[in-house]
Image (cartoon, rainbow, N blue to C red):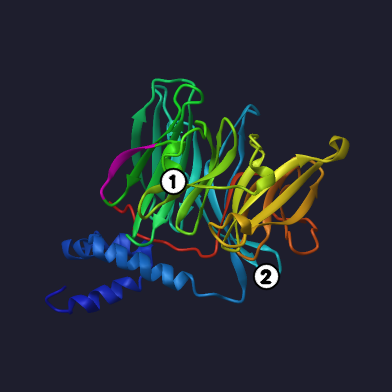
Amino acid sequence: MRDQVPYDVVNDIFGRLPVKSLTRFRSVSKTCNSIISDPTFVSTLFNLTLTKSLISTNTHSGYLQYSPTVTADHSSSTSKQLCTVVCNNDRTLTQVSKFDIPSFPDKFSIVGFYNSVFCLASYDQDHYHIIYLWNPSIRKFKKLRSTRFLYSDVRVVFGFAFDSKNNDFKVLKLVTFREKKPLAEAEIYTLSTDSWRKDIITMESLRGNEPNFGSIVSVLPPSVFCNGALHFIANTCHHGFILSFDVHDETFHEMMLPLPLCQNHSPSLQLAVFKGLLAVLFFSHGVYNTGCLCHFWVMEKYGVVGSWTRKCLIPVDSPHEFYCCTDNGELLFKSANGLVSINPLDSLNWSVLAIEDANWVGFSANSMESLVLHD
Protein backbone atom coordinates (compact mmCIF):
# COMPACT_ATOMS: atom_id res chain seq x y z
CA MET A 1 0.00 0.00 0.00
CA ARG A 2 2.76 2.42 0.93
CA ASP A 3 4.47 1.68 -2.44
CA GLN A 4 1.41 3.00 -4.22
CA VAL A 5 0.11 5.72 -1.91
CA PRO A 6 2.31 8.16 0.04
CA TYR A 7 2.60 7.32 3.72
CA ASP A 8 1.20 10.64 4.93
CA VAL A 9 -1.84 10.21 2.68
CA VAL A 10 -2.50 6.73 4.10
CA ASN A 11 -2.15 8.10 7.63
CA ASP A 12 -4.55 10.91 6.81
CA ILE A 13 -7.14 8.48 5.40
CA PHE A 14 -6.87 6.14 8.38
CA GLY A 15 -7.04 9.09 10.76
CA ARG A 16 -10.51 9.94 9.43
CA LEU A 17 -11.95 6.47 10.04
CA PRO A 18 -13.83 5.39 13.15
CA VAL A 19 -12.00 3.15 15.62
CA LYS A 20 -14.31 0.23 14.91
CA SER A 21 -13.30 0.27 11.23
CA LEU A 22 -9.60 0.54 12.08
CA THR A 23 -9.72 -2.53 14.30
CA ARG A 24 -11.23 -4.50 11.40
CA PHE A 25 -8.67 -3.18 8.90
CA ARG A 26 -5.81 -4.52 11.05
CA SER A 27 -6.62 -7.99 9.72
CA VAL A 28 -6.68 -6.91 6.06
CA SER A 29 -2.91 -7.00 5.58
CA LYS A 30 0.39 -6.82 7.45
CA THR A 31 0.89 -3.32 6.09
CA CYS A 32 -2.44 -2.08 7.44
CA ASN A 33 -1.75 -3.72 10.77
CA SER A 34 1.71 -2.14 10.92
CA ILE A 35 0.36 1.36 10.25
CA ILE A 36 -2.58 1.11 12.65
CA SER A 37 -0.45 -0.49 15.39
CA ASP A 38 2.29 2.14 15.15
CA PRO A 39 2.44 3.96 18.52
CA THR A 40 2.95 7.26 16.71
CA PHE A 41 -0.27 6.73 14.73
CA VAL A 42 -2.16 5.68 17.88
CA SER A 43 -0.98 8.83 19.67
CA THR A 44 -1.74 11.07 16.69
CA LEU A 45 -5.21 9.58 16.31
CA PHE A 46 -5.87 10.05 20.04
CA ASN A 47 -4.95 13.75 19.92
CA LEU A 48 -6.87 14.31 16.69
CA THR A 49 -10.00 12.64 18.04
CA LEU A 50 -9.69 14.60 21.28
CA THR A 51 -9.45 17.88 19.38
CA LYS A 52 -12.53 17.03 17.31
CA SER A 53 -14.50 15.95 20.38
CA LEU A 54 -13.85 19.28 22.10
CA ILE A 55 -15.58 21.23 19.33
CA SER A 56 -18.65 22.61 21.08
CA THR A 57 -22.17 22.08 19.86
CA ASN A 58 -25.39 23.88 20.68
CA THR A 59 -27.44 20.71 21.09
CA HIS A 60 -26.08 19.30 24.34
CA SER A 61 -24.10 20.12 27.48
CA GLY A 62 -21.94 16.98 27.73
CA TYR A 63 -22.13 13.29 28.49
CA LEU A 64 -23.00 11.25 31.57
CA GLN A 65 -21.35 7.87 31.96
CA TYR A 66 -22.78 5.58 34.59
CA SER A 67 -22.78 2.01 35.78
CA PRO A 68 -26.28 0.78 36.65
CA THR A 69 -26.70 -1.23 39.82
CA VAL A 70 -27.79 -4.83 39.27
CA THR A 71 -29.15 -6.72 42.24
CA ALA A 72 -28.42 -10.44 42.30
CA ASP A 73 -30.59 -12.61 44.55
CA HIS A 74 -31.50 -9.46 46.49
CA SER A 75 -28.34 -9.83 48.54
CA SER A 76 -25.46 -8.26 46.64
CA SER A 77 -25.03 -5.56 44.03
CA THR A 78 -22.53 -5.50 41.22
CA SER A 79 -22.26 -3.40 38.08
CA LYS A 80 -22.01 -5.21 34.77
CA GLN A 81 -22.52 -2.45 32.21
CA LEU A 82 -21.23 0.99 31.34
CA CYS A 83 -23.79 3.34 29.78
CA THR A 84 -23.23 6.70 28.12
CA VAL A 85 -26.00 9.26 27.63
CA VAL A 86 -25.88 12.71 26.08
CA CYS A 87 -27.31 15.56 28.17
CA ASN A 88 -29.60 17.45 25.80
CA ASN A 89 -30.27 21.13 26.31
CA ASP A 90 -33.94 20.39 27.08
CA ARG A 91 -32.72 18.36 30.12
CA THR A 92 -33.58 15.02 28.54
CA LEU A 93 -31.05 12.19 28.23
CA THR A 94 -30.37 10.17 25.08
CA GLN A 95 -28.40 6.94 25.29
CA VAL A 96 -25.49 6.78 22.85
CA SER A 97 -23.72 3.59 23.95
CA LYS A 98 -23.84 0.63 26.31
CA PHE A 99 -20.89 -1.68 26.92
CA ASP A 100 -20.61 -4.87 28.93
CA ILE A 101 -17.88 -4.55 31.55
CA PRO A 102 -15.49 -7.54 31.34
CA SER A 103 -16.22 -10.32 33.83
CA PHE A 104 -13.28 -9.71 36.14
CA PRO A 105 -12.88 -12.46 38.77
CA ASP A 106 -12.83 -10.10 41.76
CA LYS A 107 -15.17 -7.37 42.93
CA PHE A 108 -14.07 -4.08 41.43
CA SER A 109 -14.76 -0.37 41.57
CA ILE A 110 -14.31 2.33 38.94
CA VAL A 111 -11.44 4.61 39.95
CA GLY A 112 -11.77 7.13 37.14
CA PHE A 113 -11.58 7.67 33.40
CA TYR A 114 -10.07 9.92 30.82
CA ASN A 115 -11.94 10.04 27.53
CA SER A 116 -11.77 6.49 26.15
CA VAL A 117 -9.83 4.74 28.94
CA PHE A 118 -11.22 3.60 32.31
CA CYS A 119 -9.33 2.52 35.41
CA LEU A 120 -10.86 -0.15 37.67
CA ALA A 121 -9.43 -1.48 40.93
CA SER A 122 -9.87 -4.72 42.83
CA TYR A 123 -7.99 -7.06 45.12
CA ASP A 124 -7.71 -10.84 45.24
CA GLN A 125 -7.73 -13.34 48.08
CA ASP A 126 -3.94 -13.06 48.50
CA HIS A 127 -4.22 -9.30 49.21
CA TYR A 128 -2.70 -8.27 45.89
CA HIS A 129 -4.27 -5.07 44.67
CA ILE A 130 -5.19 -5.46 41.01
CA ILE A 131 -5.82 -2.61 38.58
CA TYR A 132 -7.42 -2.91 35.16
CA LEU A 133 -7.11 -0.35 32.38
CA TRP A 134 -10.06 -0.80 30.03
CA ASN A 135 -10.90 0.74 26.66
CA PRO A 136 -14.55 -0.16 25.95
CA SER A 137 -14.48 1.29 22.42
CA ILE A 138 -12.14 -1.51 21.28
CA ARG A 139 -13.12 -3.96 24.04
CA LYS A 140 -9.56 -4.35 25.28
CA PHE A 141 -8.18 -4.24 28.82
CA LYS A 142 -4.81 -4.48 30.50
CA LYS A 143 -4.37 -6.10 33.91
CA LEU A 144 -1.87 -4.59 36.34
CA ARG A 145 -0.78 -6.06 39.65
CA SER A 146 0.95 -3.98 42.28
CA THR A 147 2.59 -4.79 45.62
CA ARG A 148 1.10 -7.19 48.11
CA PHE A 149 0.70 -5.82 51.66
CA LEU A 150 0.99 -8.16 54.62
CA TYR A 151 -0.73 -5.69 56.94
CA SER A 152 -4.46 -6.20 57.23
CA ASP A 153 -5.19 -2.80 58.80
CA VAL A 154 -4.31 -0.58 55.84
CA ARG A 155 -6.26 1.85 53.70
CA VAL A 156 -5.64 1.82 49.95
CA VAL A 157 -6.90 4.45 47.50
CA PHE A 158 -6.30 4.91 43.78
CA GLY A 159 -6.19 7.75 41.30
CA PHE A 160 -6.10 7.80 37.50
CA ALA A 161 -5.05 10.66 35.24
CA PHE A 162 -3.69 11.64 31.84
CA ASP A 163 -0.35 13.46 31.62
CA SER A 164 -0.98 15.80 28.69
CA LYS A 165 2.62 17.01 28.60
CA ASN A 166 3.95 13.49 28.06
CA ASN A 167 0.82 12.15 26.32
CA ASP A 168 0.67 9.31 28.85
CA PHE A 169 -1.71 7.64 31.30
CA LYS A 170 -0.76 7.19 34.95
CA VAL A 171 -2.19 5.27 37.90
CA LEU A 172 -1.52 6.34 41.48
CA LYS A 173 -1.88 3.97 44.43
CA LEU A 174 -1.66 5.38 47.98
CA VAL A 175 -1.40 3.24 51.10
CA THR A 176 -1.74 4.48 54.68
CA PHE A 177 -1.11 2.35 57.76
CA ARG A 178 -3.25 4.16 60.34
CA GLU A 179 -1.07 4.22 63.47
CA LYS A 180 1.43 1.54 62.40
CA LYS A 181 3.61 3.79 60.22
CA PRO A 182 3.89 7.60 60.29
CA LEU A 183 3.80 7.90 56.51
CA ALA A 184 2.01 7.05 53.29
CA GLU A 185 3.46 4.83 50.60
CA ALA A 186 2.86 5.65 46.95
CA GLU A 187 3.13 3.51 43.83
CA ILE A 188 2.99 5.21 40.44
CA TYR A 189 2.34 3.30 37.23
CA THR A 190 3.15 4.75 33.78
CA LEU A 191 1.48 3.14 30.78
CA SER A 192 4.11 4.06 28.16
CA THR A 193 6.88 2.26 30.08
CA ASP A 194 4.58 -0.36 31.62
CA SER A 195 6.38 0.12 34.94
CA TRP A 196 5.84 1.06 38.59
CA ARG A 197 7.92 3.21 40.87
CA LYS A 198 7.61 3.76 44.63
CA ASP A 199 7.68 6.88 46.78
CA ILE A 200 7.30 7.73 50.47
CA ILE A 201 5.16 10.65 51.67
CA THR A 202 5.55 12.23 55.12
CA MET A 203 4.37 15.54 56.52
CA GLU A 204 8.03 16.57 56.80
CA SER A 205 8.54 15.98 53.08
CA LEU A 206 5.38 17.95 52.27
CA ARG A 207 6.40 20.86 54.50
CA GLY A 208 10.10 21.09 53.71
CA ASN A 209 11.32 19.03 56.67
CA GLU A 210 9.45 21.13 59.24
CA PRO A 211 8.87 18.82 62.26
CA ASN A 212 5.91 18.22 64.58
CA PHE A 213 3.05 18.21 62.08
CA GLY A 214 1.88 14.72 62.93
CA SER A 215 1.63 11.57 60.86
CA ILE A 216 -0.49 10.92 57.78
CA VAL A 217 -3.09 8.51 59.13
CA SER A 218 -5.55 8.38 56.24
CA VAL A 219 -6.07 9.34 52.59
CA LEU A 220 -9.68 9.14 51.44
CA PRO A 221 -11.28 8.38 48.07
CA PRO A 222 -12.38 9.48 45.61
CA SER A 223 -9.72 11.57 43.91
CA VAL A 224 -10.39 14.46 41.52
CA PHE A 225 -8.19 15.72 38.70
CA CYS A 226 -7.73 19.48 38.44
CA ASN A 227 -4.99 21.77 37.14
CA GLY A 228 -2.76 18.86 36.13
CA ALA A 229 -2.89 17.15 39.51
CA LEU A 230 -4.82 14.47 41.38
CA HIS A 231 -6.30 15.59 44.72
CA PHE A 232 -7.35 13.59 47.79
CA ILE A 233 -8.73 14.45 51.23
CA ALA A 234 -6.07 13.43 53.77
CA ASN A 235 -5.76 13.55 57.57
CA THR A 236 -3.06 13.66 60.19
CA CYS A 237 -3.66 13.20 63.90
CA HIS A 238 -4.17 16.97 64.16
CA HIS A 239 -5.75 18.32 60.99
CA GLY A 240 -7.27 17.60 57.59
CA PHE A 241 -5.78 18.80 54.31
CA ILE A 242 -5.72 18.16 50.55
CA LEU A 243 -2.95 15.93 49.24
CA SER A 244 -2.14 16.76 45.62
CA PHE A 245 -0.07 14.79 43.12
CA ASP A 246 1.33 16.53 40.04
CA VAL A 247 1.02 13.90 37.31
CA HIS A 248 3.74 15.47 35.13
CA ASP A 249 6.66 15.79 37.57
CA GLU A 250 5.22 13.17 39.99
CA THR A 251 5.58 15.29 43.12
CA PHE A 252 3.28 15.51 46.15
CA HIS A 253 2.11 18.71 47.84
CA GLU A 254 -0.06 19.80 50.74
CA MET A 255 -2.96 22.17 50.13
CA MET A 256 -4.99 23.69 52.95
CA LEU A 257 -8.73 23.21 53.22
CA PRO A 258 -11.00 26.16 54.02
CA LEU A 259 -10.15 27.18 57.58
CA PRO A 260 -13.52 26.08 59.10
CA LEU A 261 -12.97 22.58 57.69
CA CYS A 262 -9.32 21.99 58.62
CA GLN A 263 -10.17 20.34 61.95
CA ASN A 264 -12.75 18.03 60.41
CA HIS A 265 -11.64 14.38 60.38
CA SER A 266 -14.91 12.81 59.24
CA PRO A 267 -15.51 11.24 55.81
CA SER A 268 -18.16 13.89 55.15
CA LEU A 269 -15.70 15.97 53.10
CA GLN A 270 -15.56 15.38 49.36
CA LEU A 271 -13.65 17.09 46.57
CA ALA A 272 -15.03 18.16 43.21
CA VAL A 273 -14.12 20.16 40.11
CA PHE A 274 -16.56 23.03 39.61
CA LYS A 275 -16.24 24.85 36.26
CA GLY A 276 -12.53 24.04 36.20
CA LEU A 277 -11.95 25.10 39.83
CA LEU A 278 -11.14 22.92 42.81
CA ALA A 279 -14.12 22.64 45.18
CA VAL A 280 -15.02 20.85 48.40
CA LEU A 281 -18.37 19.73 49.82
CA PHE A 282 -18.96 19.28 53.54
CA PHE A 283 -22.09 17.57 54.87
CA SER A 284 -23.36 18.45 58.34
CA HIS A 285 -26.55 17.74 60.27
CA GLY A 286 -29.24 20.40 60.32
CA VAL A 287 -30.75 21.87 63.46
CA TYR A 288 -32.05 19.13 65.79
CA ASN A 289 -30.73 16.57 63.28
CA THR A 290 -33.47 17.46 60.76
CA GLY A 291 -31.98 16.60 57.38
CA CYS A 292 -28.51 17.64 56.28
CA LEU A 293 -26.73 20.74 55.05
CA CYS A 294 -24.19 20.71 52.24
CA HIS A 295 -21.57 23.44 52.55
CA PHE A 296 -20.15 24.16 49.09
CA TRP A 297 -16.72 25.83 48.87
CA VAL A 298 -14.72 26.80 45.76
CA MET A 299 -11.03 27.74 45.48
CA GLU A 300 -11.25 30.79 43.20
CA LYS A 301 -7.49 30.86 42.50
CA TYR A 302 -5.73 27.52 42.41
CA GLY A 303 -3.24 27.03 45.23
CA VAL A 304 -4.17 30.24 47.06
CA VAL A 305 -5.64 29.33 50.45
CA GLY A 306 -7.18 32.75 50.92
CA SER A 307 -9.28 32.31 47.78
CA TRP A 308 -11.52 29.62 49.32
CA THR A 309 -15.09 30.96 49.13
CA ARG A 310 -18.25 29.38 50.46
CA LYS A 311 -20.67 29.67 47.57
CA CYS A 312 -23.83 28.37 49.19
CA LEU A 313 -25.48 26.19 51.80
CA ILE A 314 -27.63 23.48 50.24
CA PRO A 315 -30.39 21.89 52.38
CA VAL A 316 -31.01 18.20 51.73
CA ASP A 317 -33.74 16.06 53.28
CA SER A 318 -31.45 13.07 53.85
CA PRO A 319 -27.80 12.23 53.29
CA HIS A 320 -27.07 12.36 49.55
CA GLU A 321 -24.13 10.63 47.88
CA PHE A 322 -22.27 13.14 45.73
CA TYR A 323 -20.99 12.01 42.33
CA CYS A 324 -19.52 14.91 40.36
CA CYS A 325 -20.11 18.30 38.71
CA THR A 326 -21.08 18.96 35.11
CA ASP A 327 -19.31 21.55 32.99
CA ASN A 328 -22.27 23.93 33.27
CA GLY A 329 -21.97 23.90 37.07
CA GLU A 330 -24.64 21.44 38.20
CA LEU A 331 -23.91 19.09 41.11
CA LEU A 332 -24.98 15.46 40.67
CA PHE A 333 -26.16 13.45 43.69
CA LYS A 334 -27.64 10.03 44.36
CA SER A 335 -30.89 10.23 46.31
CA ALA A 336 -33.79 7.92 47.16
CA ASN A 337 -35.37 9.02 43.84
CA GLY A 338 -32.31 8.18 41.77
CA LEU A 339 -29.91 10.65 40.17
CA VAL A 340 -30.67 14.31 40.92
CA SER A 341 -28.96 17.59 40.05
CA ILE A 342 -28.84 21.08 41.48
CA ASN A 343 -27.27 24.37 40.42
CA PRO A 344 -25.60 25.85 43.54
CA LEU A 345 -25.50 29.35 42.08
CA ASP A 346 -29.09 29.46 40.87
CA SER A 347 -32.44 28.63 42.49
CA LEU A 348 -31.25 25.59 44.49
CA ASN A 349 -34.10 23.56 43.01
CA TRP A 350 -33.55 19.83 42.62
CA SER A 351 -34.04 18.19 39.21
CA VAL A 352 -34.62 14.46 38.90
CA LEU A 353 -32.73 12.87 36.00
CA ALA A 354 -33.91 9.78 34.14
CA ILE A 355 -31.41 7.43 35.79
CA GLU A 356 -33.03 5.46 38.59
CA ASP A 357 -30.09 3.72 40.19
CA ALA A 358 -26.34 3.70 39.60
CA ASN A 359 -23.37 2.96 41.80
CA TRP A 360 -20.97 5.09 39.76
CA VAL A 361 -21.54 8.24 37.70
CA GLY A 362 -19.04 10.37 35.81
CA PHE A 363 -19.35 13.41 33.55
CA SER A 364 -17.40 14.18 30.40
CA ALA A 365 -17.60 17.22 28.16
CA ASN A 366 -16.82 15.02 25.17
CA SER A 367 -17.27 11.45 24.00
CA MET A 368 -14.51 9.83 21.99
CA GLU A 369 -12.96 6.53 20.94
CA SER A 370 -9.29 5.62 20.64
CA LEU A 371 -6.89 2.76 19.94
CA VAL A 372 -5.18 3.07 23.35
CA LEU A 373 -4.53 -0.46 24.71
CA HIS A 374 -5.13 -2.02 21.28
CA ASP A 375 -2.18 -4.36 21.89
Which residue does the image show at 44% across and 37% down from the upper left?
204
Q: Is the Cβ of the residue at disc 2 closer than 8 Å to that at disc 1?
A: no
Residue 323 horizontal/vertical position (percent): 62, 48
Amino acid type indicated by mark 1 = Cys
Separation of residues labelled 2 and 1 (CA atoms): 29 Å
Secondary element type, mark 1:
strand
Name the quadrant of the N terminus: bottom left
Q: Residue at x 78, y 55 (%)?
A: 350
* Residue extending furthest toward the right: 288
Q: What secondary structure is marked by label 2?
A: loop
Helix, strand or loop: magenta stretch: strand
Magenta highlight on residue 194: yes
Q: Residues within 10 Å of mark 1 (few under 14, many from 20)?
A: many
Image location (x, y in percent) of residue 175: 44, 32
Q: Which residues are magenta?
A: 193-200
Identify which amino acid the numbered label 2 is placed on: Asn
Residue 16 versus residue 189 in the image, above or below = below
Q: Nearer the viewer, residue 187 or 361?
A: 187
In the picture, the disc for residue 119 is 1
Numbered label attached to residue 89: 2
Q: In this image, 47 relative to 110: left or right?
A: left
Q: Earlier in the sequence, mark 2 or mark 1?
A: 2
